[in-house]
Amino acid sequence: MDYVVLLKQVPDLAEDLEIDSAGTGLDREWMSFVASEWDEYALEEALHLRDATGGTVTCLALGVQAGDVDELLATCLARGADRVVRVGSFEQSPDSHSAAGAFAAALDGIPHDLILTGVQAIDDLDGQVGPLLATRRDLPHVSVVTHIAVAADGKTATAHQEYAGGVVGEFELDLPAVLGVQTSREAPRYAPVSRVRQLMKTATIEKADGGGGGSGSGLTIEAMAVPESGATAEMITGNPVAIADRIAAILAERGIGAGAPR
Amino acid sequence: MSADVMVLVEHRDGAILDTTFELLGKAKSLAAESKGEAVAVLLGSGVAGLAGSLGAAARVIVIDDPAFEAFSPSAYQAALVPVVRDREPTLVLVANSGAGMDVAAGLSAALELPLAAYATEVTMDGGSPRVTCQLYAGKIQATVRFERGRGIATVVAGSFPAEAGAGAGSPMVEAVAATASDGRVRFKRLHRPEAGDVDITRESVLVSVGRGIGDQDNLELIEALAKALGGAVSSSRPIADAGWLPRTRQVGKSGLKVKPKVYLALGISGAPEHLEGMRGAELIIAVNSDARAPIFSVAHYGAVADLLDVVPALTARLGG
Ligand SMILES: Cc1cc2nc3c(=O)[nH]c(=O)nc-3n(C[C@H](O)[C@H](O)[C@H](O)COP(=O)(O)OP(=O)(O)OC[C@H]3O[C@@H](n4cnc5c(N)ncnc54)[C@H](O)[C@@H]3O)c2cc1C
Ligand SMILES: Nc1ncnc2c1ncn2[C@@H]1O[C@H](COP(=O)(O)O)[C@@H](O)[C@H]1O
């Protein structure tokens, strides 16, 4: 079984995002990047599945200048991926439709029985790459999945799709297929920084052509903005004790806490 | 191209989901502006009877076929492609659910129609849609237009009132034969959650905790506060994923929708998937160390502070 995982870096939300001077994009000058959370789950699942069925895990990331794609791919190797491939060349992370186009082209030369992506990424404005890629390559796809298992004959897989209220649909799908991973069975394994550093020097990062690119997202961004946070909230200031006092008072007004009847 | 606004209907266990009514209400007002019709598309097996409850639509296209006995992304996508291609609606509204994500992106790729994801508002401007989308877990808002005036939007649950779309009416029902299907994704069964020790949907006070708690051991502080308040502990998804609390305590898109009297959000950033489960709470008080956390845009009261300082102080103040 050949597993393929698509990964990317996204801006680190621990740092404040700023809008650029045009007002239609993020100011990328000081931005720092982290691996997209859901992609790490996708890789973790792929590694488990490969260990169960045998085969290979190949990780694909677009060759974007912003951030550090090679570090991302070296981390995949450190975690146990068999091959890593840098796809195409982009100044910054392109829209989902263009990304799907590039991956679709690269997959011509990469064996794939099961393609795992993160279910979503925080920066996608024009939809999720998984189903976009699947449709371009005419593959079946399911998003928001957990509990992936591959049948003994390697021809089908099963996966759970999550709905509201904890309800879950179980599906069987013909392989090859694309799954958008929501969580992995175990927390993503740790890759020692020293090992990643070493692999960045010694490992082979293959390159694949991303094709001619697509027609883009078909969206025009008129404006981007930081929503006015707390515009409707009354903000409580002061030290923790003062904050606690105020919250207790607000609750008491509603008959909650401090011995109030339930 | 038509001026219609199309809505993909989602239903489960023989009932239309609330998110569909949210979209229908919006579609109706948008279609009035674009001078088209609100068109609901209903796929299923033995579902023709459900069309009557889609009264907010002017027209319901029903594809009633054993092939759609249960939801399957591949089957739905295959059947919808010709419908959307032939009717050429100005806008297709799809709920940003597990099922909706699959179908909307699939349609977008198959029909080369642009897709605006995580929409929270849609307006019509000169007959073409303008969509407000959330990005970066709610930290950025983008306003977009479709380059050629038409496209698809996946809408975050709870963005529009369901009441507007749940009204009675007598839509024109149009039965359409499925011209395509795709059996490569086959539904097997539905798993329903087991009842938990606590039913958070019935609690009037929820002390809800997110990744900001840092360490599992700190949960004790949260339990103590909940006890002092006579409430229960709930959480965001990462806490349930980590196994620190049972899944039945999870609030949000893939968890439960709650509407308590008081919802204390502690160390929860307020991602759209979390907000859709709790924005209906009567009183929301948020404590978060990040002044820009999106939770503060739904909270009634907020404090930028370390929850590990505020929680013990509050418990002590309450005599806990
Ligand atoms: C299909 C799908 C379904 C999903 N369903 C759900 C769902 O049902 N429910 C859900 O919650 N999520 C759901 N998610 C996940 C969602 O996107 C977010 O990842 C999640 O809500 C984030 O949880 P969080 O706020 O606890 O963590 P984070 O986003 O990591 O936020 C932690 C917050 O804690 C703050 N913080 C850190 N330390 C402290 C401190 N000491 N004191 C105070 N504040 C602190 C930080 O500033 C930050 O704002 C879903 C995602 C997908 C893709
Ligand atoms: N530029 C990219 N490079 C690598 N993987 C990507 C890229 N864009 C999207 N993906 C994959 O597709 C998933 C969904 O991304 P998105 O469509 O941006 O929500 C991601 O979690 C990745 O697995």
Image: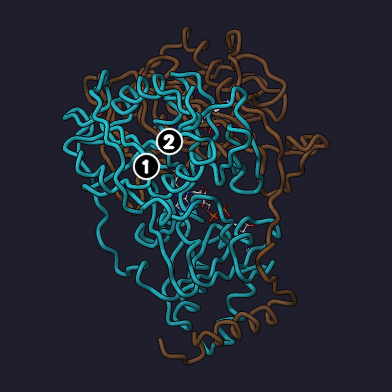
Chain colours: A brown, B cyan
Question: Horizontally, is A134 left or right of B290 in the view?
Answer: left
Q: Are marks 2 and 1 on the same chain?
A: yes
Considering only vertical position in the picture, is A181 above or below B287?
Answer: above
Question: Horizontally, is A244 left or right of B274 in the view?
Answer: right
- Reading the image, the residue beneath label 1 is B57
Q: For disc 1, does the CB lie below 8 Å from ligand 1?
A: no
Q: Which mark is residue B95?
A: none
Q: Is residue B303 visible?
A: yes
Residue B119 picture location, percent across and down: 54, 42
Task: Please identify the residue farthest to the bottom as the structure is shown.
Answer: A259
The kind of residue on which mark 2 rests is Glu
Give the chain letter at badge 2.
Answer: B
Residue B92 picture location, percent across and down: 46, 33
Element at label 1: loop
Residue at 79% across, 39% down: A30
Q: For disc 2, does the CB lie below 8 Å from ligand 1?
A: no
Q: Is residue A217 visible?
A: no
Image quarter of residue B292 = bottom right
Give the camera-side residue of A71 and B79.
B79
Residue B275 picture location, percent across and down: 51, 56
Give the chain letter at badge 1.
Answer: B
User: If the picture is divided into quarters, which one holds ligand 2?
Assistant: top right
- Reading the image, the residue beneath label 2 is B37
Give the camera-side residue of B313 and B39.
B39
The kind of residue on which mark 1 rests is Ala
Residue at 41% across, 64% down: B258
Residue at 29% across, 64% down: B196
Within-10-Å neighbours for mark 1: few <14, some 14–19, many 20+: many
Distance between mark 2 and mark 1 Cα atoms? 8 Å
Asked whether the residues under the numbered discs 2 and 1 touch, taking CB atoms below 8 Å apart as contact, a structural biologist would say: yes
